[in-house]
Amino acid sequence: MELLEKKQIRDQILADQTNSGLTKSEYAEKRLGLNKSWMSHLDTKWDIPGVIGDDTWSRLKKYITGRSAYKCIATRNYIDIVHTCDRALKSKRALSIIGEGGYGKTKSLELHKEKLESEKIKVYYLDAKGITTRKRLVVALLVACGCYKEGIISNQLEILRSFLMGKDALVMIDEASALEGTKVTYLKDILTALRGVCGVVVAGTPYLLKNLERGAAKDRFLYSETRDRFFSLATILHAPEDSEAEAIFRINGIDGKWLKILMGEMRGEHLQQFYWRNKPTFRGIEDAITLVRIAMTKEREISYLMEV
C-alpha cells in the first residue's frame, strides 16, 4: 500500500473517530477491535515503516470502505428499533425486538449504538450466535461489558449487576433466536440481574417468541419465568415497503433505467435477478444494489471498449 493511500485512510479514520464522540482509546476498542493505545500510533507514527503492519492497514481500509459503500435511511423498522432501545434505556427494563432475518435488526442496533455512544451513553452489544451453555452466555456478556472475572455464575451475575449499576447504560443481546430450545431460558438469570439496573433489548427472529410461548403454554421449566422478564409486548418488525426500497436505491446513487429495473417497472427474464421483490428483505435490497453496481461497471467497460 502506497504512503498516499495510507494517509487517506488515516485521515478518514481520525475524522470518523472525531465524529463518533468516542475517545481515541474507546474508538480503537469499540469500532476497530484494536488495543486501546493503538490510535496514538495512527495519529503520530503512521508513516514510520513497521509501526503499523500491512494486515492492520488492510483492516482499516476494509472498515472505512464498508462504512461508505452502502448508505441507509431511517426505515420504519429502524425507527421502531430506536424507540424500543430508548424506552428500555429510560425504564431500565428488558424489551424484545422480533423480525425475520434481513429485516435490519443488527444494522439498526449497530447504527443506534453508534449514536448513543456519541452522546456518551454506554452501550454493550452481544451476538448470541454460537453460545451453547448458560455459563458461556454469562461470560460472553461480561466480556462484552469489559468486566469479566472468573467465578461461578451467581457471582459473575453480581459482578455484572454491580458494574452496570448507576451507569446510563443499554445492553443489546442480538441473534437471541440462536438460543434454541431450552437454551432460551439462559436469558432468565441475566434479565433478572439487570432488572432496574439498565436497559436491555433482546433481538431475534419470530422463533424466539414462538419458542418462549410454546414452552410457557406447556409449563416447561423456566419458560414462563423467562418470558415474564420482558417488560411489555414485543416490537414486531415488518417487511420493507416499495417506498423504502426506492429511497434506499436513490440514496445509493441508483436512478433512471436501473432504478426502474430494480423496482420491477422494466420486466424481462434476464432482468428478474435484479428485481428486489424476489428477495423482499433489507438484505435483499443491499444485494440488489451490489448486483446493479457490478452490472453498471460492466456496462461502462463495454461502452469504453466500443469507443476504443
Image (tube, helix red, strand yellow):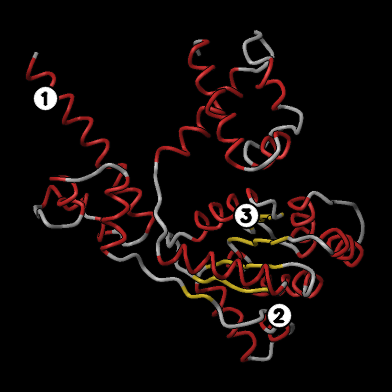
Q: Residue at x 21, y 36 (%)?
A: 295
Three-letter code for the amino acid on which mark 3 is drawn: Leu
Please determine whether, in this image, residue 261 is positioned above or below residue 66: below
Front residue of 46 and 191: 46
Please determine whether, in this image, residue 199 is positioned above or below residue 232: above
Real-space Cα separation, disc 2 to disc 1, in angstroms: 61 Å
| CA neighbours of label 1 inside 10 A, class few (<14), some (14 to 19), many (20+) | few
Rendering coords of residue 20 (x, y %)? 60, 42
Real-space Cα separation, disc 2 to disc 3, in angstroms: 24 Å
Residue at mark 2: 229
**Res 131 label:** none
Residue at mark 1: 303
Rendering coords of residue 142 (x, y %)? 79, 55
Mark 3 element type:
helix
Front residue of 233 and 273: 233
Rendering coords of residue 199 (x, y %)? 70, 68
Front residue of 276 and 78: 78
Real-space Cα separation, disc 1 to disc 3, in angstroms: 46 Å
Three-letter code for the amino acid on which mark 2 is drawn: Arg
Q: How many marks?
A: 3
Horizontal side of 8 relative to 163 (left or right) equals left
Please determine whether, in this image, residue 26 is positioned above or below residue 37: below
Mark 2 element type:
loop
Q: Residue at x 73, y 60 (%)?
A: 169
Horizontal side of 252 relative to 31 (left or right) equals left
Mark 2 and mark 3 in contact? Answer it, CB < 8 Å: no
Which one is closest to the eye, mark 2 or mark 3? 3
Residue at mark 3: 116
Q: Pick whichever of labels 1 and 3 is earlier in the sequence.
A: 3
Three-letter code for the amino acid on which mark 1 is drawn: Ser
